[in-house]
Image: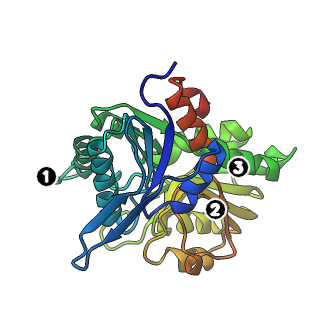
Amino acid sequence: MNFHGKDIKIFTCNSNRPVAKQIADCLGIPVGKSEVTSFSDGEIAVSLHESVRGSECFIVQSTCAPVNDNIMELLIMIDAMKRASAARITAVIPYFGYARQDRKAKARDPISAKLVADLITSAGADRVLTMDLHAAQIQGFFNIPVDHLVGAPILANYFKKMIGDNPDDYVVVSPDLGSVTRARNFATRLGCSIAIIDKRRPKANVSEVMNIIGEVKDKKVILVDDMIDTAGTLCNAAQAVVEKGGATEVYAGATHAVLSGPAIDRIRNSVIKQVILLDTITVPQDRYIDKFITLPVAPVFAEAIERIYEDKPVSSISV
């Protein structure tokens, strides 16, 4: 029996309203009544229009662009619920911003991911539910439980249907050395072979040299990564496997569609045939192109929320 809260309530700030609605629909409940606006000077204003006393509350909010506004919306809504006597508050963060600042790369660097973790904890969150952290060790930055979901099974199910009975015609490629483990696990799910792009700059002001470790000639390539930001690494890797490796087609799959700066133009003009994304970040309609296919994460998050409420293990979802 669950003693944390009398009922489940799903609330949302402004970054993930469609996903929050889908999660609530999966659970058969309405989205909580709330309003997140800003004052004329830009300060965030949060109003809860229903009681949360004694309830198990889940706040859905990706900390994507505008990153700082979305983080403040989340923190202020957590504080509002804490002061309104919610039984337990879970921050549901499909995409966790600042995750790439997880270590000191050089002297006097901040570790911003740790700072954001401390802010969420100090605001009053009791636990965090997220998907595909850029660095898994960020779970250790929190002093509260973190349930870490993975998007690979959702992407893999799509690619399995595309591959059918021809896994030998496809090869999963890691676009850089940092994504090798992810690519290897993904290839195992699909029953495909793996290749790796090794890029290096011989010396200053000399362009990068792309080396392909593995066989991609006459193969259909699936590039897999956790996020697509400016799409430079992804598009360069796609060009390399076609021009240097002799691949016939290139597909890409990623959990988080950050898509900042020149990303859209780069993908539009690249050799990539399709880009499969999850909706952890909502892509604006004016930035959505024909190459994109978006898959929903709501069913996975809804199942995780139900398991958290019932005190059942969440880890089995990711298997």
Q: Is residue 68 left or right of residue 158?
A: left
**Can residue 231 be seen here?**
yes
Q: Residue furthest right?
A: 165
64, above or below 171, in the image: below
Q: Is residue 266 above or below residue 314?
A: below
Q: Which mark is residue 171?
A: 3
Residue located at (35% from left, 62% from top): 70
The colour scheme used here is: rainbow
Q: Tell me the SS state at disc 1.
A: loop
Residue 195 visible in the picture: no
Kindly state the secondary structure of the residue where label 3 is placed.
strand
Q: Going 58% across and 51% down the picture, which residue do you hit?
A: 30
Q: Nearer the viewer, mark 1 or mark 2?
A: 1
Q: How far separated are the C-alphas under marks 1 and 2?
A: 36 Å
Q: Which residue is mark 1?
A: 107
Choose mark 3 or mark 2, whichever is in front: 3
Q: Is residue 160 above or below residue 245?
A: above
Closer to the camera in the image, 47 or 23 = 47
Pointer 2: what residue? 241
Amino acid marked by disc 1: Ala
* x 42%, y 51%: residue: 50
Q: Quadrant of the C terminus?
A: top right
Quarter location, residue 71: bottom left
Q: Identify the mark nearer the N-term, 3 or 1.
A: 1
Tell me the mark number nearer the camera, choosing from 3 and 1.
1
Identify which amino acid the numbered label 3 is placed on. Val
Q: Among all residues in the image, which is located at the extreme top?
A: 1
Front residue of 306 and 84? 84
Q: For the residue labelled by badge 2, is the local secondary structure a helix, a strand or a loop?
A: helix
C-alpha distance separating marks 3 and 2: 11 Å
Q: Is disc 2 surrounded by few (<14), some (14 to 19) or many (20+) residues within 10 Å?
A: many
Q: Quadrant of residue 69?
A: bottom left
